Image (cartoon, grey):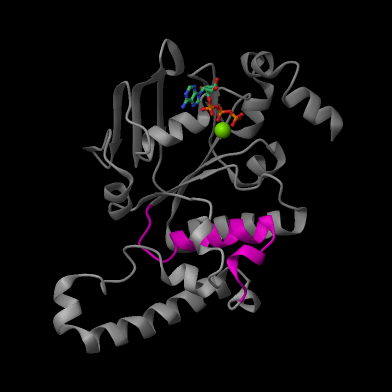
Amino acid sequence: MIEVENLHRHFGGFRAVDGASLKIATGSITGLVGPNGAGKSTLFNVIAGALPPTSGRVIMDGEDISGLPPHVLFHKGLLRTFQIAHEFSSMSCRENLMMVPGSQSGETLWNAWFGRGRIAEEEASLLKKADEVLDFLTISHLKDEKAGNLSGGQKKLLELGRTMMVDAKVVFLDEVGAGVNRTLLNTIGDAIKRLNEERGYTFCMIEHDMEFIGRLCDPVIVMAEGKVLAKGTIQEIKANEQVIEAYLGTGLKNKEAAG
Ligand SMILES: Nc1ncnc2c1ncn2[C@@H]1O[C@H](COP(=O)(O)OP(=O)(O)OP(=O)(O)O)[C@@H](O)[C@H]1O
Ligand SMILES: [Mg+2]
């Protein structure tokens, strides 16, 4: 699905991403882990078009998509979740879903002039779709709640829901579980699994919670200092000396010890 070839993203003289190469297989839930500052979010930002690469390539289904802007990638089915924008916080969950660009054609001039009937029809089908998404995510009871009133975890679910309003192929999740309570984390995990199994979504997710990663992801890719250090099953990763080394002091071992 996605191939990253010798990707660099520098900030001045600093090499945040320093020659990273990796593949994300179609149909996988690929985990991306690594110590703080490893370059994971920067890599995501480059893949998803928020930052141009300094050099290197990103290939999607054989096509060079390096440096394409987010809205173009969006239409190709490559999505990353975004925090609910401030201006949408006073809109209901349902309205937030209905606002997802690309899920409606009401804004084109042609439709504005000639498509009134069609717009009403689309509006109804959008509403239906939004309600299906809310149902899928088990948050139907929140459909009329303002997005701004949701808990952190519920917001993450709604962000995931936004990817379901369009035909997503590959979705990038940056710390979707951060600060989310266990119950909601399980709901988010289940939603990711079901989207993968039932709708064929490919995922790549950055996460620090190794238990969460281990439960969902195969393979797991480890980044350190802007490079890919290792790739394998969670067991292989946990047993990898280089990985343990990279995490020493802050990561895996301490987290494991802490339970
Ligand atoms: N816009 C920027 N300008 C300058 N330096 C940046 C910029 N964005 C990121 N960096 C630096 O690049 C390095 C990698 O950052 P990045 O956010 O990609 O790490 P990360 O692996 O996502 O870390 P974390 O796990 O803490 O989220 C860090 O040292 C960071 O300070
Ligand atoms: Mg990050």
Is residue 67 found left or right of 26 in the rendered image?
left
Picture mark count: 0
Is residue 31 found left or right of 129 in the rendered image?
right
**Residue located at (76% from left, 16% from top):** 249
Quadrant location of the C terminus in the rendered image: top right
Q: Where is 245 relative to 255, above or below?
A: above
Indicate the position of residue 90 as horizontal and vertical percent values.
Answer: 56, 68
Indicate the position of residue 170 as horizontal and vertical percent values.
Answer: 40, 49
Q: Give the overall secondary structure of the magenta segment.
A: helix
- Residue 190 appears in view: no
Q: Where is 113 relative to 56, above or below?
A: below
**Residue located at (51% from left, 29% from top):** 40
Indicate the position of residue 70 as horizontal and vertical percent values.
Answer: 33, 45
Instruction: State the image quarter where residue 20 is shown.
Output: top left
Quadrant location of the N terminus in the rendered image: top left
Q: Where is 28 relative to 168, above or below?
A: above
- Residue 23 appears in view: yes
Which residue sits furthest bottom? 117
- Comparing 47 with 212, the one in front is 47
Instruction: State the image quarter where residue 24 is shown.
Output: top left
Which residue sits furthest right? 258
Whether the magenta-drawn stretch holds residue 113 is answered as no
**Residue located at (55% from left, 71% from top):** 93
Indicate the position of residue 45 as horizontal and vertical percent values.
Answer: 42, 35
- Magenta stretch bounds: 145-169
Which residue sits furthest top? 13
**Residue located at (47% from left, 75% from top):** 130
Q: Where is 70 relative to 249, above or below?
A: below
- Comparing 24 with 83, the one in front is 83
